[in-house]
Amino acid sequence: MFIAIILVSIPCLADNGFFPYSMTKNPVGPYLEKTTADCDLFEFGPTDGWRVNFDKQRQEFKTIGICSYPNGTLEEINAMAKAKIYETRFTSNSTEPYIKGLTAHSLHFDKDGKETFIPFHYIVFPDGYEEEIFSDPLIKVNCIWTINQIPWAMGNWTINCQSIVIAALGDGNLTQMQVKTIRERISKLQDIKSDATVKSRLTESQTNLIQ
């Protein structure tokens, strides 16, 4: 099969121009051949670099996602998410796209410019402290507020593509300070998009606390 590859520089809104793979050392052809025909997530750099950019599927901001995650430092959360979420995807047999065997990358960069695998936009610690992972979680595309870094946290890809996600660290039982912080963040996000709906992966009783 002959595959024509056009090398163009495609600006991305969240990736700092990072192309982790080399056409010389890691040709893209075998991955394109096994990828579903209408899946257009491969991007090519100005030289021989290439990448897979899931954020090309970003959508209009519609949902505020709430979930829980085990307590830990940012470094521990990053390592856990990389292993359980990203590396799992990069070793799967999915053909949308086919990327099995590639070194996992996120194309998400924190406020210090370091690649991160944390799959949320905001983390709320048990003491109520909020960590904002990205400096630009929302961007305007054609005057529409749009998700910049797609979170991998809501259990549904379409919802991920439309969501800003807040993760409460702990065992799923919110502290009073977490409730206060989450409510404040929801209010700020709804100031930006008044009809943004809250979708929670917490239990019903815990979800009721933040509404």
Image: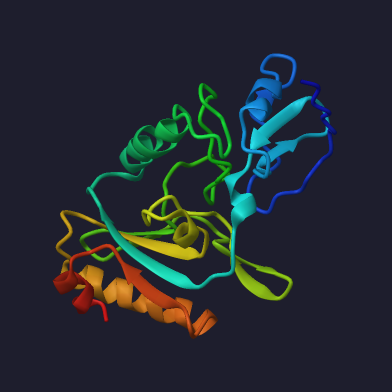
Protein image colouring: rainbow
Which residue is located at x 38 percent, y 53 percent? Answer: 153
* Place of residue 129 in the rendered image (x, y in percent of width and height, measured from the top left): 30, 63
The image quadrant that residue 87 belongs to is top left
Which residue lies most toward the front here? Answer: 1
The image quadrant that residue 9 belongs to is top right
**Quadrant of the snapshot with the N terminus:** top right
Q: Is residue 185 visible?
A: no
**Quadrant of the snapshot with the C terminus:** bottom left
Relative placement, left or right, of 120 versus 71 is: right
Relative placement, left or right, of 196 versus 37 is: left
* Place of residue 120 in the rendered image (x, y in percent of width and height, measured from the top left): 41, 55
* 96 over 128 or under it: above or below: above
Front residue (pair 77, 105): 105
* Place of residue 182 in the rendered image (x, y in percent of width and height, measured from the top left): 31, 72
Which residue is located at x 59 percent, y 69 percent? Answer: 60
Q: Is residue 83 visible?
A: yes
* Place of residue 170 in the rendered image (x, y in percent of width and height, measured from the top left): 19, 54
Relative placement, left or right, of 138 versus 127 is: right
Which residue is located at x 42 percent, y 49 percent? Answer: 119
Q: How many marks?
A: 0
